[in-house]
Amino acid sequence: MTSLPVTVDPASPVAPYEQVRAGIAELAATGRLAAGTRLPTVRRLAEDLGLAANTVARAYRELEQAGLVETRGRHGTFVTAQAGGVPDEARRAAADYAALSRRLGLPPEQALALVAAALDARS
């Protein structure tokens, strides 16, 4: 996992955890962090930014409370669809299509290729 393009300005009056929180939220909102993107571990990001682990942990907690990320235990912390402004209907449709594709035995690459072709056909 590579580091996030988030910076912390030690001279800023904004608390470091808030700078991290706002930076990740902005990356997700603009699509630079897509839904499902795994974030670096707290320890890794803290090391990359030169911060205490508790500072990054607080930023992650606040992002999770806002519904922008979700922690899946040992699997890590991931950007939610909500963070990127994906409508609930689109998330449900994607989940339904994924379930149908699995039931039909389609490999993920083929299922994705079908979606790409359908999107291109509508252009």
Image (cartoon, rainbow, N blue to C red):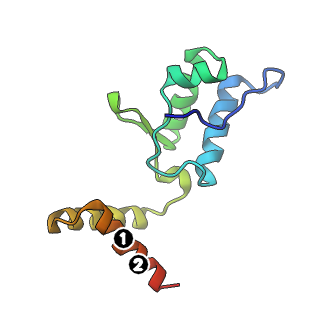
Residue ID at (63%, 46%): 27
Q: Give the label on residue 10, or none.
A: none
Q: How many marks?
A: 2
Up the image or down, 122 lies above or below 89; here it is below
Residue ID at (61%, 52%): 29
Q: Secondary structure at mark 2?
A: helix
Local crowd at mark 1 within 10 Å, few (<14), some, or many (≥20)? few
- Quarter of the figure with residue 115: bottom left
Up the image or down, 8 lies above or below 50; here it is below
Residue ID at (35%, 64%): 94
Image location of residue 120, percent across then percent down: 47, 80
Up the image or down, 79 lies above or below 114; here it is above
- Horizontal relation, residue 71 to residue 103: left or right: right
Image location of residue 97, percent across then percent down: 29, 68
Local crowd at mark 2 within 10 Å, few (<14), some, or many (≥20)? few
Q: Give the amino acid type for the residue marked by disc 1 in the picture.
A: Ala
Residues at marks 2 and 1 touching, judged by CB atoms closer than 8 Å: yes
Image location of residue 77, percent across then percent down: 44, 35
Q: Secondary structure at mark 1?
A: helix
- Quarter of the figure with residue 55: top right
- Mark 2 → mark 1, Cα distance in angstroms: 6 Å
- Horizontal relation, residue 64 to residue 11: left or right: left
Residue ID at (47%, 53%): 81
- Horizontal relation, residue 37 to residue 75: left or right: right
Up the image or down, 64 lies above or below 111; here it is above
Image location of residue 106, percent across then percent down: 21, 66
Q: Give the amino acid type for the residue marked by disc 2 in the picture.
A: Ala
Q: Give the label on residue 117, or none.
A: 2
Q: Nearer the viewer, residue 63 or 42?
A: 42
Mark 1 lies on residue: 113
Q: Nearer the viewer, residue 116 or 58?
A: 116
